[in-house]
Each structure stands twice: as C-alpha cells, then as structure tokens.
Image (cartoon, grey):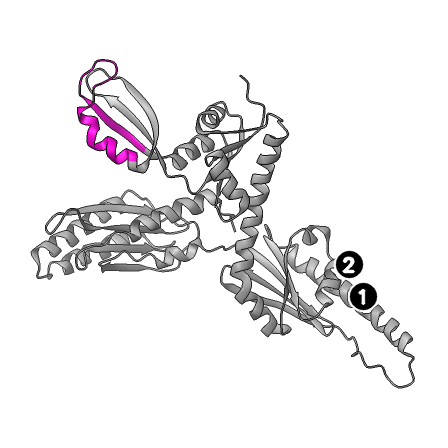
Amino acid sequence: MVKRTSLERYRLKRMLEALASKEGRGTELISLYIPPGRQISEVVQMLKEEWGTASNIKSNTTRKNVQDAIVKVTQRLKLFKRVPDNGLVLFCGAIPQNGPGSEKIEGPYVIIPPEPINIYLYRCDSKFHLNYLMDLLKETETYGIILLDSSGATFATLTGRRLNIIQEITSGIPGKHRAGGQSARRFERLREMRLIEFFKRVGKHADEIFLQIPDLKGLILGGPGPTKTDFEKGRFLDYRLKEKIVAVVDTAYTGEQGVEEIFERAPEIIKNVRYVEEKRIVQRFLYEIGHDTGLATYGEADVRRALKSGLVETLLLSEELDKTRLRVECSSCGYSYSETMRRPEVKNLEHTISSAPCPKCQAASLQIKEKTEIIEDLAELAEASAANVEIISTETEEGQMLWKAFGGVAAILRYKLQG
C-alpha cells in the first residue's frame, strides 16, 4: 500500500469540506463513483439513459439543471481514455448563488481516489454523497498487534478498519501454583525458563509475520498483567520491530476479545502516532534554529526564496494557515505583482481593486488574475524541487509553536541559505 502523505490528506480533506458545504435545490446534485475496471463507454451509455429518464421530471428548472449537469459530467468523462487504477469520482450540479432562480451548474469536480474504490454509484440528491471518500481520510496504514499473557499470544494486523487475526499460540507454561513435591524456588525457576522460551517463540513468530509487511507503520503490544511489559523489555523482537512499538496497552482479555479491545482503542493510538511524527519533525526544525546551524529558515519570504533555490529538504506548513497568494495584473500596461494576504482581506480587495490605480500607469484597470491558497502555492514550489511537504496540526505543543512563533511557514534545508 502506498503511503499517503499529509499533503495528500490535506488536499482531499479541503476538497471534501468544500463539496460538503454545497447544497442544491431538490435533487439537482450528481454524485458519480466509478470503480477501476469499468469501461468509460459503459458509464457514458448509463448517463445517456439517465438524461432520458430526467426528461420525465415535472419541474422545468429541475429537469434542465439535472440534464445540463449530466451533459457536463459526460463531456468530462469522455476526456478519460480509461478509468484510473483507483477509480474515478465526479460531482456536478446546480448550486443556488444569490436566491431563487439563480442556480449555477458547478463542476464537474473530479477526484481520483488515493486508494481503489469498489462502489459503482450514480445518485441525484440535494447534497453530494461524500461518505465513501470521507472514509479514505481515516488512517489506513498497517499496524501489527501482539496480545500476550503467560497462557498464550495472539498476532493480528489492523489496516484502516480491517482487523485480521493471523495466528494464536499457547505458552505451555503451568499456572503459578506448583505441583506437589516441588520446592517453591525450583518451581519458579522452571516456570521462568519456560516463560523465556515462550517469549523467544513469540518473537520468532512476530518476526516471521510482521517483517514481511512492507511499510509496517507500527506495532501495538497488549494484554492483561505485566507479561507484555516483560516481553517488551527483553531482547525477543527483531530490532526493526522493536523500534516500531507505538503503544503498550492494558486489556482485560486475551485472544480475540483482547484484540477487539485494542481495535476499539486504535483510533486514539493511531492519532497519537501522527502526533509523535509531527513533534519529531518540528523538534528537528527547532534544533536547527536553536543551534544556528544554518539548515533551517522560517517566514514566507525566506522559505519561498529557499524553495526557488532548491535548498529545501522538508517544508513545514501549519494547517491553520488562512492566507491566499494573489497575482494582480493591469490590463492596460501589463504591470503585475504578487501579494499574500488573509482571506478577509482578499474579499475587501476584490470589491475595491477595479477602482484602484495601477502603480505604473495609474489606470484603473487592475484585475486579480490568479488566486491560490498559500499552502497550495508553497507546496507546488516544494513539489517542483522534490522537497517533502508536512502539514502540521496545532494539536501538539510543537505544532502550536510552529503556528504562533514562526507564522506557520518553516523549512529544514539541504544546504545553508546564502546571503
């Protein structure tokens, strides 16, 4: 499974938030999900039939809006030679603008899912159907689970909401009550030896199961009592797995019931894993800044300069950034300039720019030619120079510091920034 980056998650989330905010009148919004393997011609034929069915709609306005949206979706779909490997999702429909009778056909909005979809859906409604894509925002990396106590161990994997119990083994260790005729010390010694042998078997099974999983995100240990902690402290796991332990969880049960307990707590565990990653990334930036190594910079101007010079290794952007990058151009003399401003300021500029004089020719002919969210603007520069992009939340102390102390824009550099 291809790892989804924080930038890809951010882009999908923003798109879905924008679509969720749109509401049509009646059933004028089209949602179309096409799974991989479907023929474009087959879907186009289905849309033609739906166009014909829509002719039976009594309301003239609704009929026209639905048929116009179907035509736009069909035209957009024909630009694809085949359905992409992960499938294809299109949204289109009439959205009221300023009041009754002011609908405008928006879209089609096209999304190629980050993972394969297995649903074929055509739906007309007053809202876009987004649940299937919303599910893709949930973490879907694979986590290993080892649940153990002195009686046995269970091995499982968790991928998104899919839980798979792979194997269960018994320990063969007797209970804590010794057999008749044995001294307490001898019994405990023999029991401890068997426990160590059991831990070795658990480690061997874990190596065989989890080292075969490419890009295993983390390993969760669980079980009742101290056995799991004793196992973690020993040298029973391959070092590559030991480094991936992200949580040690107390459970009331072992076996399948215990795995289900971990499954219920997994969302919080997985959320914390991302927070740990974010903390580590920001802490590295803070180290470079604090030790004045010259391998970090912050602030939009300096980061933009470093990106254009190809010096950035990792771009750090706070998800709280609410700024927009504008390119303003004079239609009379061709003069242009770029400026970054907050979203409320953009609205004010849109209302006043037509009467503002051009700084070069003084003509009142300035226009906003381009408008891009600052996160997207900087991310595109980063992608052009093969820099990593990390969207950092404000859920951690480090994330708050990136946003409040450094303006939400920072970079870790490959080389020192000159000048």
Look at label 1 and name its amino acid. Answer: Ile
Would you call the spot at circle 2 few (<14 residues within 10 Å), some (14-19), or many (20 or more)? few
Magenta span covers which residues? 345-371
**Residue furthest top in the image:** 361
Disc on the earlier residue, 2 or 1:
1
- Which disc number belongs to residue 140? none
User: Where does label 2 land, which residue?
Assistant: 234
Q: Nearer the viewer, residue 402 or 274?
A: 402
**Would residue 9 be found to the left or right of residue 397 on screen?**
left
Number of marks present in the image shown: 2
- Which disc number belongs to residue 196? 1
Residue drawn at the location 41% of the way across and 37% of the way down:
375
Residue 328 visible to the viewer: yes
Indicate whether 74 appears above or below 163.
Answer: above
Would you call the spot at circle 1 few (<14 residues within 10 Å), some (14-19), or many (20 or more)? some
Look at label 2 and name its amino acid. Answer: Gly
**Would residue 180 be found to the left or right of residue 232 on screen?**
right
- Secondary structure, mark 2, is loop
Indicate whether 75 appears above or below 345.
Answer: below
**Mark 2–mark 1 distance (CA, rounded to whole Å):** 9 Å
Residue 179 lies, in percent from the top left, at 86, 84
Residue 133 lies, in percent from the top left, at 38, 55
Residue drawn at the location 36% of the way across and 46% of the way down:
14
Are circles 2 and 1 on residues that touch, CB within 8 Å?
yes
Residue drawn at the location 81% of the way across and 66% of the way down:
196
Residue 285 lies, in percent from the top left, at 57, 35
Indicate whether 234 appears above or below 151.
Answer: above
**Residue furthest bottom in the image:** 180
Indicate whether 135 appears above or below 114.
Answer: below
- Secondary structure, mark 1, is helix
